[in-house]
Image (spheres, rainbow, N blue to C red):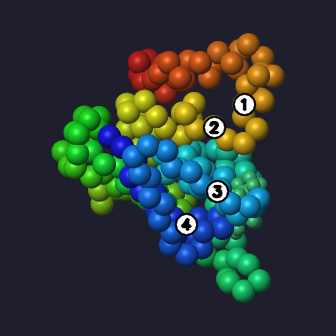
Amino acid sequence: MQFSKLRLTGFKSFVDPMELVIADGLTGVVGPNGCGKSNLLEALRWVMGENRPTAMRGGGMEDVIFAGAATRPARNYAEVALLLDNSDRTAPAGFNDQDNLEIIRRITRDAGSAFKTNGKDVRARDVQMLFADASTGAHSPALVRQGQISELINAKPKSRRRILEEAAGISGLYQRRRRS
Ligand code: ATP
């Protein structure tokens, strides 16, 4: 299972529909300060079910919706779609019946977030479990935001342990599921 495309509409500074192709190998995003590089990483976390506004550098989750600019009005919703290539059929059970998997998250002002996988309404938890089963997700240690390396070096042993547990695939989500 491979990430193949990220599509954004009205998400933070990406007011017009924008598609990022994630090809085989390394994909780099290059640009001047403030052009939206971190917003792209946040969009990836968000579509995988991130539910902490602080992880989106916002006060509330609706802060991810394009807030308007001098020449453009604010939007009423934000949407991020993540396309996965599943032609090797390695997606977790329940999601493994098609060659392509499209996960969509949309947030509408005053109505909250809704998720879909291949056009079907699903719960946030279903999407979080899909990525946990694929050993990735909004809290994956593979997603490293700006400043995180120095935080890790300076972290207390307990926080460092949490990161190592996530990397080893024994994160909180799995521990909760085992108990339920
Ligand atoms: P840096 O080089 O500082 O890391 P960056 O390229 O990662 O910057 P981001 O921090 O991702 O850039 O993008 C910040 C830009 O996104 C800012 O111009 C900010 O005003 C804009 N932005 C963030 N949220 C919204 C929003 N809801 N509506 C409109 N613009 C937004």
Task: Classify residue 60 as left or right of residue 107.
Answer: right
Examine the image and state in which quarter residue 2 appears. top left
Can residue 46 be seen from the camera position used here? no
Task: Classify residue 89 as left or right of residue 41.
Answer: left
Type of amino acid under label 4: Ala
Q: CA distance from mark 3 to mark 4?
A: 23 Å
The image position of residue 8, as x and y in percent, is 51, 64
Type of amino acid under label 2: Val
Q: CA distance from mark 2 to mark 4?
A: 23 Å
Query: Residue farthest to the left?
Result: 97
> Which dot, 2 or 4, sits closer to the camera?
2
Foreground residue among 94 and 5: 5
Q: Which residue is located at x 73 percent, y 13 percent?
A: 157
Type of amino acid under label 1: Ile
Residue under label 1, please give it: 149
Residue under label 2, please give it: 144
Mark 3–mark 1 contact, CB under 8 Å? no
Mark 3 or 4, nearer chain start = 3
Residue under label 4, please give it: 78
Q: CA distance from mark 1 to mark 2?
A: 8 Å
Disc on res. 30: 3
The image position of residue 11, as x and y in percent, is 59, 65
Q: Which residue is located at x 49 percent, y 44 percent?
A: 26
Mark 3 or 1, nearer chain start = 3
Mark 2–mark 4 contact, CB under 8 Å? no
Q: CA distance from mark 3 to mark 1?
A: 19 Å
Mark 2–mark 3 contact, CB under 8 Å? no
Mark 2 close to ligand 1, CB under 8 Å: no
Mark 1–mark 2 contact, CB under 8 Å? yes
